[in-house]
């Protein structure tokens, strides 16, 4: 019968451990190993494939490297906040999080300053890439309040793909649910610059308000505006 090792003593490759626990990529880590800047329990690291666990003391030069915990966060962004670490005019979404979370998180897709709703953040770069890459077809669902009633023809165009101003390629197929004549749910799998606003402009309408309700398997649910929560494992695993 197999024995499950406690997480503490699970062994992983040295390069993987360092890439997860520092800001260096796997290839940069390999270079650091070749440059003899990495030690394990006081001895110079021999190879990127070498296995380490929490019980080993891994150092970069004189700095002890501690295993970084992975964090996955959903936040309901209010209008007026910006999805960037810093801005001269608007407060950052990161200001809504406790300091210990805010220090090393990346945005898994951004919303415009006036858009509200679901924003995902993590310090797991593979995960944020999977969430945002169109290849993985994680549909993002937006509730869109429109200036004009939407026509059947415009709905057809949005579904089959529209040409955005200044771009050559049509948008990928989208889904549209009509809520009222001036409100739709639009589901898209890409994240081009101001995509929803530009798609509606391309069919002769205008977005008055934009709110993101879900990204892939993660929904905003009853998360209040300005509030955040850690994602549960099932939601995170949707993307692994
Ligand atoms: N599309 C937009 O135009 N704006 C957003 O914030 C998100 C998608």
Image (cartoon, grey):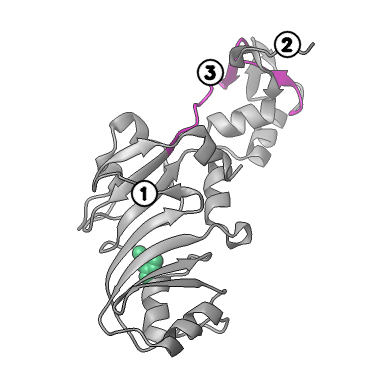
Dots 2 and 3: beta carbons under 8 Å? Answer: no
Marks 1 and 2 in Cβ contact (< 8 Å)? no
Q: Is residue 45 left or right of residue 64?
A: right
Taking depth in this image into account, of 224 and 191 the one nearest to the observer is 224
> Magenta stretch?
48-72
Q: Quadrant of the C terminus?
A: top right
Distance, label 2 to label 3, CA atoms, is 35 Å
- Which of the four quarters of the rendered structure image does ligand 1 lie in? bottom left
* Position above or below: 68 against 119: above
Element assignment for label 3 = loop
For residue 3, the mark is 2
Q: Nearer the viewer, residue 16 or 38?
A: 16
Question: With 153 as the anchor, is 80 left or right in this view?
Answer: left
Closer to the camera: disc 3 or disc 1? 1
**Which residue is depicted at the point 64% across and 34% down?**
29
At x 49% / y 84%, what residue is drawn?
156
Q: Circle 1 sits in a helix, a strand or a loop, which is it?
A: loop
Corner quadrant of residue 26 = top right
Q: Nearer the viewer, residue 183 or 116?
A: 183
Above or below, comparing residue 146 to residue 191 in the picture? below
* Residue 151 % position (x, y): 38, 88
Q: Earlier in the sequence, mark 2 or mark 3?
A: 2
Q: Residues within 10 Å of mark 2 (few under 14, many from 20)?
A: few
**SS label for mark 2:** loop
SS majority, magenta? loop
Q: Residue at x 69, y 19 (%)?
A: 11
Between 91 and 182, the one lying in front of the other is 182
The residue carrying mark 3 is 62
């Amino acid at each position: 019968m197999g024995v499950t090792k406690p997480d503490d003593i699970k062994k992983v490759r040295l390069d993987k451990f360092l890439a997860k626990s520092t800001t260096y990529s796997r290839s940069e880590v390999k270079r650091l190993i070749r440059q003899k800047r990495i030690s394990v329990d006081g001895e110079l690291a021999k190879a990127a494939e070498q296995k380490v666990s929490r019980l080993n003391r891994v150092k970069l030069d004189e700095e002890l490297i501690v295993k970084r915990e992975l964090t996955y966060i959903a936040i309901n962004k209010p209008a007026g906040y910006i999805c960037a670490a810093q801005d001269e005019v608007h407060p950052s979404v990161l200001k809504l999080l406790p300091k210990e979370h805010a220090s090393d998180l990346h945005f898994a897709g951004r919303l415009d300053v006036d858009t509200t709703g679901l924003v995902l953040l993590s310090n797991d770069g593979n995960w944020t890439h999977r969430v945002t890459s169109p290849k993985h077809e994680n549909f993002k669902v937006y509730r869109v309040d429109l200036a004009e009633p939407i026509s059947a023809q415009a709905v057809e165009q949005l579904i089959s793909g529209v040409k955005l101003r200044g771009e050559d390629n049509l948008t990928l197929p989208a889904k549209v649910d009509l809520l009222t004549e001036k409100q739709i749910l639009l589901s898209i799998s890409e994240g081009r610059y101001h995509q929803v606003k530009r798609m509606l402009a391309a069919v002769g309408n205008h977005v008055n308000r934009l709110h993101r309700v879900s990204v892939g398997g993660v929904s905003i649910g009853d998360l209040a505006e300005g509030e955040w929560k850690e994602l549960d494992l099932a939601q995170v695993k949707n993307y692994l």
